[in-house]
Amino acid sequence: MRWFYGLLYYFQKRGFQVCERIAERLGIRARVVRTTFIYLTFVTLGFGFALYLFIAFWLRIKDLVYTKRTSVFDL
């Protein structure tokens, strides 16, 4: 289990270093960059789920409106 925490620490350290370099280049605080990445992650995951629900709703409405009729007498 110790190797897992060592690996986790390594990636956290390198990840924070990337955020710090981006923040330094943009001239803002690294904390702002980290929270922006977190918010963008939630937005993109939420957008995918909302798109899925919208498409499912749209297909359901389409199936209700455009039903295939086999005969003229089905009207």
Image (spheres, rainbow, N blue to C red):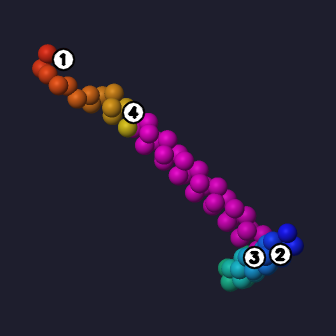
Q: Earlier in the sequence, mark 1 or mark 4?
A: 4
Q: Which residue is mark 3?
A: 11
Q: Which residue is mark 4?
A: 60
The Cα–Cα distance between marks 3 and 2, rounded to whole angstroms, is: 12 Å
Q: Secondary structure at mark 1?
A: helix
Q: Amino acid at mark 1?
A: Asp
Return the mark for residue 74.
Answer: 1
Residue 58 at x, y percent in the picture = 39, 38
Q: Amino acid at mark 2?
A: Trp
Q: Is residue 20 visible?
A: no
Q: Which of the image's four quarters has the C terminus?
A: top left
The Cα–Cα distance between marks 4 and 2, rounded to whole angstroms, is: 50 Å
Left or right: 44 with respect to 33? left
Q: Earlier in the sequence, mark 3 or mark 2?
A: 2
Residue 60 at x, y percent in the picture = 39, 33
**Farthest front residue?**
1
Q: Amino acid at mark 4?
A: Arg
Left or right: 16 with respect to 53? right
Residue 13 at x, y percent in the picture = 79, 78
| Segment tinted magenta in the rendering | 29-58
